[in-house]
Amino acid sequence: MLDVLGVGEAWEVPNAWVDGVRGRLRAWGDDADALRPGVFPDFVDGTPAAVWFAHQVAPLLAGWVPVLRGEYADLGAVLTREFYRPSVRLGGDGYVVRVAPTDWPLQVVSGARGFPEDVRVQALRLSRDVVSLFVDAAPMAARARALTSAFDRVLGDREATRMHAAADYDTIEQFWRTAVLSDAERVVLPELGGPSAALQYSLDTLRDVHGKLSAVVAGDEAGEFAQLLARMVRAAGLPGQPAAVGQVLGVAGWDVEYAIADLEKTGFRTHEWLARNTAWLARAVSEGHEALASAWAAAATRVSVHLAGVLERGAWPEPEVPDLGAYVRLLERPAVVDDSIKLVWGAKKQEAKPEQPKAAEPQQPVEPKPVQPKPVVPRIEEPKVVESEPQELILPDPLPPNAGAMDELDALVGLESVKDAVRRMVAEIKTNLRRQEFGLPAQERARHMVFVGKPGTAKTTIARLLARIYKELGVLESGHVVEVDRSDLVGPTVGTTAPMTAAKFREALGGVLFVDEAYTLVPEGQPGDFGLEAVATILKMMEDHRDKCVVIVAGYHREMQRFMESNTGLQSRFPKLLSFAEYDTNQLVAIFELQARQQGMAYTHDVLVQVRKVIPPAPRGHNFGNGRFIRNLLEEAISNQATRLARRDPDTLTERDLRELLPEDVKPAASMRAEDYLLQKPGT
């Protein structure tokens, strides 16, 4: 088996194909007229250039800086075993990363410099013939066919062939970079455009696959490309992004610089980040996104190689980014994935929590739910004791009256990657304003965004805070938010959608247009749906009112990926993606505390124990409401408190009675039990 990460499915290498290639190489070895320019290291004396070249190109035809795994990972060694005599040979199901100069297809042509012209032409033909051996090998077929076609065009052009026979190598190399390949061939052989083109391709593919993976797998490692690249720069031990990277990224390089500066302030531990990254990829695999995870691992490896300077004969990245060893083990032993997921994702804190009381109460080692040690002495039997110990009551602690939008952002539970993204956007705006004061050109970019995440993960809350922040910074005039969904934008008949959408957009001028469940505008399998007209209208008005409105589209990860791919204009106009992770159980309890304080309610520790019991265990359903579930739970608790107090004489109720929630008040709503909530319609 040969598995090239990020290049389709693993290939079960046919024995007949291997035998055929070996037979062709053996024929070259038996040919007395075969080109033999000299001795090749690790090969037997007299090895022809064709055999050596086949060893070199076998992995490189699989991709630029390919990552290969399986028993055929070192494919070149397998094919040339009759000639190849290395001091070390790989075995088993390990992985191989291959790197070569960007002009690797011309290695035989380069090696023939100084030989007579007929030998140089022979080297050109030989290169073509070796590459053609791989046109039927699935992982290498696309690149092999493109390169074979390019060689055929050169050999079919008398002047081009003559140039390869007589010109200096620099001229030949420049000819291949600029004139040989068609546009379609450049797509599959990007590195032949030279080092800058190879770097551009590596960064673009990582940006693209990181966006796609972030859109379907939540977590702190999902989110902005700039933050990922900053971490990779720091992992490579670099003080800042290399100049070549900055030149390729252009204005977007500012985001990377801001992200690097943030890491300097907060501290960055490479091995901890790699562990989190591996856990994120493990979650992707466990959720059925192995192809995307592998493409991400391959793309990150390419960029890591560039950052480490391997192409300029620098040392290999240490540590390796990503941790390919851990990822390959993950693919080889899928049964281990579930355990690793439990340690890092979903149920991790839910499951770890009960272990703490066990340590405190060793006399009850068999207690199945030690999260309830206190109710052994029911508080309801001694209400006056509760009132006499007010220090046990957790009272509201609201934000100060002069708190700004950034203070409210910091007070939100979780959402660390989202908060970091907002802080970087604010830093960019402030820097641009300062640049304008000095008469320098501002590095302005579109501020439209994509929010992806499940219901109740604070997407609307962040949109409202962003609107206020932009108003405080002078970016938006009013800072209001117009929240819409399909029903507000799509009309019932032909000709009604565009006016409805335009009216809502004009209403949002000076503020933010927040399109919830934006994916419903492009229903799957309905090419004539009126929602497409709404999308086109929004795009046109975004262009007409570029700096007067910020548009945010939001929805589920997978559905929003489909939405962004439905119109070619969407991805370029929405440069930022913020991924909202699900809350774990501890965070949901913290949200209950925050919302209770905002409502002016007070509670004891026992109330929080009861909240934890009511929250459905992880993993939770696709439509679980997260923060919305907690809001409903709190509203039901306040209603239950009112019912309880109604049984007492109103004249005896104190302020404490009116504020305090008791454990008995906390229960799922009678109209919507927790199991029903998991099945509710998205957005409700």
Image (tube, rainbow, N blue to C red):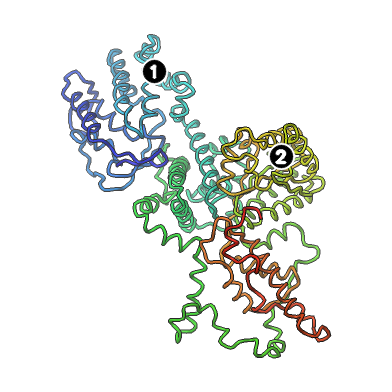
Q: Nearer the viewer, residue 172 or 514?
A: 514
For residue 168, the mark is: 1
Q: Quadrant of residue 610?
A: bottom right
Asked whether the beta carbons under mark 1 and mark 2 sit within 8 Å of each other, the answer is no
Q: Is residue 60 visible?
A: no
Residue ID for mark 2:
490
Nearer-N-terminus badge (1/2): 1
Whole-percent x, y for residue 341 in the image: 45, 60
Q: Is residue 542 above or below residue 23?
A: below
Which structural element holds mark 1?
loop
Whole-percent x, y for residue 419 in the image: 64, 55
Query: Which quadrant holds the C terminus?
Result: bottom right
Q: Quadrant of residue 365?
A: bottom left
Which residue: 63% across, 68% down?
590
Q: Nearer the viewer, residue 34 or 608?
A: 608
Q: Is residue 146 visible?
A: yes
Q: Is residue 639 above or below residue 419?
A: below
Q: Could you tell me the amino acid type at mark 2?
A: Val
Query: Which quadrant holds the N terminus?
Result: top left
Q: Could you tell me the amino acid type at mark 1?
A: Asp
Q: Quadrant of residue 408?
A: bottom right
Q: Is residue 633 left or right of residue 37?
A: right
For residue 77, the mark is: none
In three-dimensional space, the C-alpha distance between marks 1 and 2, rounded to whole angstroms, equals 64 Å
Q: Nearer the viewer, residue 31 or 366?
A: 366
Which residue: 51% across, 72% down?
353
**Mark 2: few, some, or many residues within 10 Å (few <14, many ≥20)?**
many
Whole-percent x, y for residue 504 in the image: 77, 41
Q: Is residue 425 left or right of residue 375?
A: right
Which residue: 22% across, 29% down?
20
Whole-percent x, y for residue 443 in the image: 69, 38
Q: Is residue 262 above or below residue 386?
A: above
